[in-house]
Every structure is written in C-alpha cells, then in structure tokens.
C-alpha cells in the first residue's frame, strides 16, 4: 500500500511539473515572475518582503487569491473575503481519498492544534469530489478529524469551478481521469496565504518562487534517499512569521 501510494504521488507531481512548471518557467525567464527581495508592483505588496517570504509575481502582478464562493460543512456561504485579515492554508482533497488525503489532513489538524485559539489563522479545504462531498458528508468528516477551529471550512460546489480555482488560482494541480482510482487525482500540496490575500512562499533551491508546500508527507516522516522530505515544520515557521507581522 505504501509503495503504491508513493507511486501515485510521484505520478501526480510529474503531471504537475509537465503542465504547470513550464508555464511558470517561461514567465520567469521572460522576467514576468519576480524573485523575492525586489520591489513589487501592486497594492499592499509594493514594499520589499521583510519576513523572508516571497510573493508569486505573474506578469508584473503579485498573485492574489481569486474570487470564489462555495458552501462549507455548515451550509454557510464562504468566499475569499471570509479569510481576509487571516493567515490561512489551502488544500484540495476529497473525503473518499484512500491515500494522500490522510496524511494531509493529519498534518493540518496538528497545525490547527498548534494555533488553536488564534482567530487570525484559518484553513480552506476544497473538495474535488463535490457530487459525493455534500455539506453533510463534510461535516461528518470534520467531526471525525476532531476539527474545532471555526475558521477551518470544508467547501463544496461546482466541480469545474473548484478545479479551475485549484489549477489556475493556487497552482495546486488537480484533475479527473477515467483510468485512475475514483477518477480523481490531486497534488497533495498546500498553499500559504497572507492577511492581504496574497500567495506567499519560499524560494526553491534554484532561487525561484515555489508556490506550495508538500502537505502529503507526514510531518514526522523518516524518509530515505530520494524520497520527498516533510515540509510541515518550515510551513509552521512561515505561518508564525506572517502572524507576527
């Protein structure tokens, strides 16, 4: 099971790289994607970053969370404005996921516990299986995970809108394929959003902005050579940086 899971993860990450990294790279070499430490162009992001985190700058504009509107597990309407003023994490998942969603949401629950009581921290979980993941199903799922943070919303809605938000809004690859289990796959990655709605990240080993954190690797995982290392510890560090601004 573990071997099959990592094969599946490797396939998802490969698809992400094939579809999205070339697009980002082309923008980068054309100087459309701007590294951290340079002056930014718009809104609240005009000042240089002082927290060591960069903005995802596309075509001269710092990437902000796009507009969205979905129902959560309590049948409340949630939009991007719901999270304004909060530091929050974004994931795309589904409740019937048999593998990577399990460590993803265990990681998120550990993070939620760490920031319990902090009203300025939240989590946005979008289901890519909305036909099955109704508000009632999501409410039971949240209960099973012991979710108590009132700012952790499990959302459902139109599938095409959710996939577009994932792929184009947050660069967290998801898709549907008939020849894989459940017909659904997703990257298992998290996005970090600041109080002003901007996607934030660190630089990768090549000095380029990396708009995600590996959410599918357990935070206490012991990994072998060539395996994906956990990034939850550095994600927690970066959440603290933004909350302390």
Image: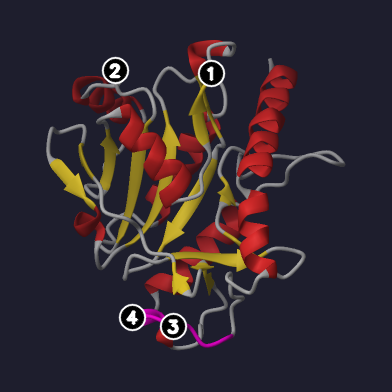
Magenta segment includes 42:
yes
Query: Quadrant of the rendered structure where residue 37 is?
Result: bottom right
For marks 2 and 3 on the same chain, the one whose residue lies earlier in the sequence: 3
Asked whether the viewer can see residue 109, the reply is no
Judging by the rendered image, the residue that carries numbered circle 1 is 177
Judging by the rendered image, the residue that carries numbered circle 3 is 41
Which residue appears at 34% of the width and 49% of the height?
A: 123
Residue most toward the front?
A: 30
Q: Main secondary structure of the magenta part?
A: loop
Is 240 displayed left or right of 52 in the figure?
left
Location of residue 244 with respect to 149 vertically, above or below: below
For the residues labelled 2 and 1, say whether their Cβ atoms are less than 8 Å apart.
Answer: no
* The C terminus: image quadrant: bottom left
Callout 2 crowding tier (Cα within 10 Å): few <14, some 14–19, many ≥20: few
| Residue 172 image offset from top left, x and y in percent | 51, 44
Q: Determine the secondary structure under disc 1.
A: loop
**What number is the disc on residue 131?**
2
Compute the Cα span from label 1 to label 3: 39 Å
Query: Quadrant of the rendered structure where residue 32 is?
Result: bottom right
For marks 1 and 3 on the same chain, the one whose residue lies earlier in the sequence: 3
* The N terminus: image quadrant: top right
For marks 4 and 2 on the same chain, the one whose residue lies earlier in the sequence: 4
Compute the Cα span from label 4 to label 3: 7 Å
Judging by the rendered image, the residue that carries numbered circle 4 is 43
Compute the Cα span from label 2 to label 1: 16 Å
Compute the Cα span from label 2 to label 3: 40 Å
For the residues labelled 4 and 3, say whether their Cβ atoms are less than 8 Å apart.
Answer: no
């Amino acid at each position: 099971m573990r071997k099959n899971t990592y094969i599946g993860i490797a396939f998802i990450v490969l698809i992400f790289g094939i579809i999205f990294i070339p697009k980002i790279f082309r923008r980068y070499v054309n100087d459309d994607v701007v590294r951290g430490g340079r002056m930014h162009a718009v809104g609240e992001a005009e000042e240089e970053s002082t927290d060591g985190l960069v903005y995802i700058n596309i075509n001269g504009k710092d990437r902000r969370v796009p507009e969205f509107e979905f129902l959560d597990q309590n049948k409340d309407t949630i939009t991007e404005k719901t999270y304004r003023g909060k530091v929050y994490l974004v994931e795309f998942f589904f409740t019937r996921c048999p593998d990577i969603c399990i460590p993803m949401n265990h990681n998120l629950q550990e993070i939620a516990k760490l920031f319990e009581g902090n009203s300025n921290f939240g989590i946005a979980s979008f289901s890519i299986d909305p036909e099955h993941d109704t508000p009632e199903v999501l409410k039971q799922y949240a209960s099973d995970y012991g979710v108590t943070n009132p700012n952790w919303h499990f959302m459902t809605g139109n599938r095409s809108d959710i996939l577009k938000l994932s792929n184009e809004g947050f660069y967290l690859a998801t898709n549907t394929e008939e020849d894989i289990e459940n017909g659904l796959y997703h990257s298992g990655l998290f996005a970090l959003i600041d109080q002003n709605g901007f996607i934030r990240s660190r630089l990768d080993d090549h000095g380029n902005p990396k708009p995600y954190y590996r959410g599918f690797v357990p935070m206490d995982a012991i990994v072998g050579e060539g395996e994906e290392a956990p990034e939850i510890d550095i994600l927690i560090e970066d959440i603290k940086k933004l909350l302390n601004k």
